[in-house]
Image (tube, rainbow, N blue to C red):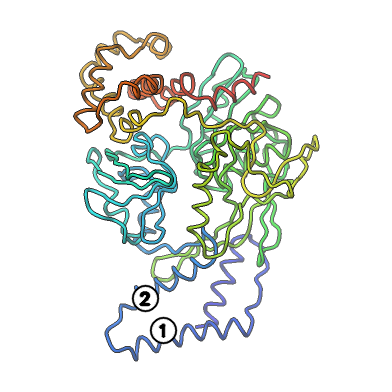
Amino acid sequence: MKHTLKATIAASVLSLAGAARAQQITAGQAAQFQKINQVMYLIANGYVDTVDMPRLVEGAIVEMLGSLDPHSVYIGKEEMKAEEQEIEGNFEGIGIEFNVLRDTIVVVNTVPGGPSEQVGLMSGDRIVYVGGELKTKVRLGDVPKFLRGPKGTKAELRVVRPGVSDTLEFTVVRDKIPMYSLDAAYKVDNNVGYVKLNRFMATTDDELRKALRGMEGIRSLVLDLRGNGGGLLDQAIRVAGNFLKPGSLVVYTEGHSMPRQEARTAYVEPLFGSGKLVVLVDESSASASEIVAGAMQDWDRAAIVGRRTFGKGLVQQQIPLGDGSAIRLTVAHYYTPSGRSIQRPYKQGDARGYYRDFAERYDSGELTGGKVHAADSSQVYKTLVEGRDVYGGGGITPDVYVPIDTTGYSDYWSGLVRRGVLLEFAVTELDRHRAGYKERYKDFDTYARDFTLTPEMAARLVELGKSRGVEYDEKGMERSRRLIEAQVKALIAQRLWDTTAYYRVINAESDPDFAAAVAEAKR
């Protein structure tokens, strides 16, 4: 057994880098492997009652990996099947990336354009009820069974949000989950282009290059990586190659059992190699997004605008196990070209503290202007061209900080969003008046200029909210009117045209991050 395990680990480590050095397993380590086998044998053959050995083994694996870092995980056989379906884009559900922490479902991220994002689910939310049933003692592999379902069916969720005393209720209408990388691409004006990438998939670079070719003549580009949780490393390298000189170092990896491995750009000529580049990031930009943003910052190629990124810089190798399950084992760290570790600090075995630290960015004021950033002044690095100071300590700290604008937030607006009222109103409005909209608004530009939420429409929205349990609040309505009107307008535009139309409305009418990025692009 120990020789087989040794060979498996060695082969897996070697496969990560192609020519990596596999360390020899010591005699002490071999003795520990034998100890585990001995305990399993004694339980299987000597315990007083019948034992569910697969469950026992899986539990032991989960506990072992949980004592390491927050991103080393066990993936059961059924979960592996579900992940394969997700890669193929052939499932329907509520559109979240999730994990299970202490038997509770934690929202890691919402799928951009998906139904959960549209009703306001957020990273860090704990889903405690689904359809009125308590879901606080669940296994990771069981979660898709009650979150996924046919398009059009509803998932009634109750959620605990860090920093909010009461539970929040959401009505999420299941839908086909979008699996494309590019949410939007358009010219802001004749000189400035905008591209939003929601993840790094096998087609990301192709999508980006097609978008760039369609914006010929622009002098500046805003690359929006907000909410982008990462994805394929090779696509991050390819994306960076559209902006950096050939052969430029984008990222390198290094770990206890892994020698330094460098990833460099390979394009003969970058597609957008000389124009002004602005990269938009926020607290949910992670992994591959941070690799791209860090490389652009280190090479003085772009201004980074927004808020400090998540700080996920651990390299996982997915290692299949014999029964169709797998583990994702952290084997190295990601470092930017200047030598900064992207990974924010963590304590081994303390995943709860790791995610609590992320949630505390809201409470500390880092995201709302109380603190510009949480840069570690003891970890100062120099950019590679201009020699500017950049900071380590976890995540990518922006060059231009933009706090979250909460001036339009109200409990009334929050209730409308969480109960899906704004989305339902937009859908209902088009169900009843689609022909009229098509006749009145021949193109998006006409719609963007002329559409307003009339008093009659606002009254219907208020009544729909009441019927869904959101009582009218005049002060809340006045405080949030700009947000409500922009979101209704954007949701209708998305259904009349496409996701790009949604972002064209939201960016122009209610997004200070976007405004700051465009201002930087025009400097």
Q: Is residue 30 above or below residue 392?
A: below
What is the three-letter code of the residue carrying label 2?
Leu
In the image, 255: left or right of 126? right
Residue 486 rendering spot, x and y as whole percentages: 40, 20
Circle 1/circle 2 CB separation < 8 Å: yes
Q: Do we see residue 200 in this rendering? A: no
**Disc 1 and disc 2: Cα gap in Å?**
9 Å
Residue at point 50%, 86% (across, down): 35
What is the three-letter code of the residue carrying label 1?
Met
Residue at point 56%, 14% (across, down): 189
Residue 493 rendering spot, x and y as whole percentages: 36, 20
Which residue is tagged 1? 40
Which residue is tagged 2? 56
Q: Is residue 327 above or below residue 432?
A: below
Neighbours of disc 1 within 10 Å: few (<14), some (14-19), many (20+): some
Q: Do we see residue 212 in this rendering? A: yes
**Among the two numbered marks 1 and 2 on one chain, the one whose residue lies closer to the N terminus:** 1
Residue placed most toward the observer, 27 or 266: 27
User: Is disc 2 placed on a helix, strand or loop?
Assistant: helix
Q: Is residue 56 above or below residue 493?
A: below
Residue 25 rendering spot, x and y as whole percentages: 62, 79
The total of numbered circles placed on residues is 2
Say which quarter of the image contains residue 476: top left
Residue 195 image label = none
Residue placed most toward the observer, 258 or 162: 162
